[in-house]
Structures are given as structure tokens and as C-alpha cells.
Amino acid sequence: MRKIMVLGAGTMGSGIAQAAATAGFSVLLCDVAEEAVVHGFHVIEKNLSNAVKKGKLDEYEKKRILALIATTTEKSRAVEVDLVIEAIVENIDVKKKVLAELDEICPSHTILASNTSALSITEIARATKRPHQVIGMHFFNPVPVMKLVEVIRGEDASDETVEVIKELAEKMGKQPVDVKEAPGFIVNRILIPMINEAAFLLMEGVSSADDIDTAMKLGANHPIGPLALGDLVGLDVCLAIMETLYNETGDSKYRPCPLLRKKVRAGHLGRKSGQGFFVY
Ligand code: 3HC
């Protein structure tokens, strides 16, 4: 494994690119729009500069990491890579279409990994002619800080693919955990319903946003409260995960909170839009 394409230069994609380059891999950061890749690269530059200011990285290391990251808007450059990690929009039809395209472009040894937060890896893999080389590689936000990678095995993934991806996660300084395919995997199955429940508390007027978050920080020792966490993850992403949990299981305990839906309809998506449960 030498060269990795990260497809999607948003919050997760740029974080994954940073972690891969920091581990010494050559990275192609790809997005459809030039502005998106430029923005993604700037976020990485800013993160590394902050680390230099804090004395956690020297200027030489920063330059070495940045030199390992090239940006492109051409998916066709996937022909150069040993692994693609897609971190594009959380929509199964879009992911299937993009993976089918990558399957045509990539060399036969290339592994196709999806950073999907809740969707079916088996279904995504079936859009390609290499389902044994398709896998879920689920990172957490903020990627440079969060130590976990869920390695999700779809129905057809080979043992070799699973092992290669676990080894890669370790090289990136992450702890991999094995997960069999199930909606929301481990973390999002537990975490996102908690955020949804906090939205119900707020909607029902049980407490204020500040007090709900303070309660969970001080009463459950969480680093940030559930509403602030929803804003960090993105309320559109939270809603998409709740909908997947609900649609896949039919269990009413996963019904999305109407307040979450209303925020998303208003475009109040959290930190990335400047407003969510809180204003930024
Ligand atoms: N990018 C890079 N680094 C970041 C960062 C970012 N966006 N945000 C914070 N950091 C770094 C800071 O630079 C700092 O680094 P240092 O220790 O080297 O100085 C460190 O993280 C701590 O940051 P701060 O001191 O500014 O703030 P906090 O102590 O409040 O920590 C936090 C911030 C790490 C985000 C913490 O609040 C936290 O752990 N929150 C919970 C995060 C979480 O649960 N994430 C999972 C979300 S679910 C998910 O991603 C799955 C998806 O599918 C939805």
C-alpha cells in the first residue's frame, strides 16, 4: 500500500487525507469541485500549522506531510492508487454510482473503502465487480484526533481485505475494531440516537440546550454535550443516520426527532453552516 485516493474533500475527507499523509502515505485528495479540494487542503495546512505553534510538529515535518498530498478534480487518477477511501455524500445511490465508476478505473488490486456512517457495505460492494475488495473504513470526527476506525465487513469482503485495512488503520495511528455489517455499525447505533434523544428533550421544553449539554458533560463525563456533538457531526448527517436506522429496522425507537428534521430543512446544519442547536 503506497498511494491512497481520498474521494471527497469535506470535513471527513480532509481529515482522512491528513491522517494518511502524516503516516507517510502518498495521498491524492479528490473532489468534483476545485473550491472543495482547495478548501480541504487549507484545512489540513491550518491543522498542521496549529500543531507547529503548539510545538507538537516541526516546520520540516509539516512541509513533508503537505508535500505528500496532491489535489485533483479528476476521478480518473484513481488508476494510480492502491486504495480509494470515499468520503462523499451519505446517499447510497450516489455511493453505488461512484464506486461502480471507480471499479472501472482502478487497477485490479485496488481496494475500495467507504467511510459511510451507516449505509450497507454489502449493497455498495455489489455495485462493483470486486465485492471481495470493498470494505467499510469508518473514521470519526475530528479525524486527526479520534483514535477509532470501525472496519466493516460486508457479506462478500475477503479476509485479506479486512486484514490490509486493519493494518493500514494501525499505521495511521488508529485502533481498528471489527464490525459485521449492521445499520449504524457500533458507534453511530449508540451515539446518534443519544443526540436524537437530546433533541427530543429540547423540543419538549424539558430543559435548555445549554443545560442538556452541561448535564451530559458533568453527569456522564462526555467531552462535549450531545447537542454540541450533533452540531459537530452535522445535523444533516445525524438525520440521515437516524433515517437509515429507522428504515432498516422498522423500529420506532429510531424515529428522527421532528426538531432535528426542522433544523435540517432550515439549513441549520451545525458548525459547518454557522448555526445548529447553537450559533457559531
Ligand atoms: N481538527 C483537528 N484537530 C482538532 C479539531 C479539528 N476539527 N478539533 C480539535 N482538535 C484538536 C485540538 O487542536 C487539540 O489538539 P491538542 O491536544 O494537540 O492541543 C485537541 O483536539 C483538543 O481540542 P480543544 O482543546 O480545542 O477542545 P476539546 O478539548 O474540547 O476537544 C474534541 C475537542 C476532541 C472535538 C472533543 O470535544 C471531543 O472529543 N468531542 C467528541 C467528539 C466525538 O464524539 N466524535 C465522534 C462523532 S461521531 C462521528 O464522527 C461518526 C460519523 O459517522 C458521524
Image (cartoon, helix red, strand yellow):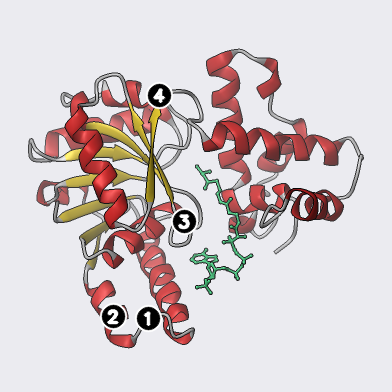
Evaluate if marks 1 and 2 touch, with contact meaning CB atoms under 8 Å apart: yes
Q: Is mark 3 on a helix, strand or loop?
A: helix
Find disc 4 in the rendering and name its residue. 181
From mark 3 to mark 2, how far is it between C-alphas?
22 Å
Residue 228 in view of the camera = yes
The residue closer to the viewer here, 76 or 133, is 133
From mark 1 to mark 3, how far is it between C-alphas?
22 Å
Q: Residue at x 88, y 50 (%)?
A: 208
Find disc 1 in the rendering and name its residue. 57
Evaluate if marks 3 and 2 touch, with contact meaning CB atoms under 8 Å apart: no
Evaluate if marks 1 and 3 touch, with contact meaning CB atoms under 8 Å apart: no
The amino acid type of the residue labelled 3 equals Thr
Q: Answer above or below: position of 156 versus 42.
A: above
How packed mark 4 is, by other alpha carbons closer than 10 Å (few <14, some 14-19, many 20 or more), is many
15 sits to left or right of 191: left
Q: Answer above or below: position of 198 versus 15.
A: above
- In the rendered image, the residue lying farthest to the top is 250
Q: What's the mark number on residue 173?
A: none
Of labels 3 and 2, earlier in sequence is: 3
Of labels 4 and 1, earlier in sequence is: 1
Evaluate if marks 4 and 2 touch, with contact meaning CB atoms under 8 Å apart: no
Of labels 1 and 3, earlier in sequence is: 3
The amino acid type of the residue labelled 1 equals Leu
The residue closer to the viewer here, 222 or 70, is 222
Q: Nearer the viewer, mark 4 or mark 3?
A: 4
Whether label 3 lies within 8 Å of ligand 1 gets the answer yes
Find disc 2 in the rendering and name its residue. 61
Q: Answer above or below: position of 113 versus 23.
A: above
Rendered image quadrant of residue 244: top right
Whether label 2 lies within 8 Å of ligand 1 gets the answer no
Residue 114 spot, x, y in % from top left: 34, 38
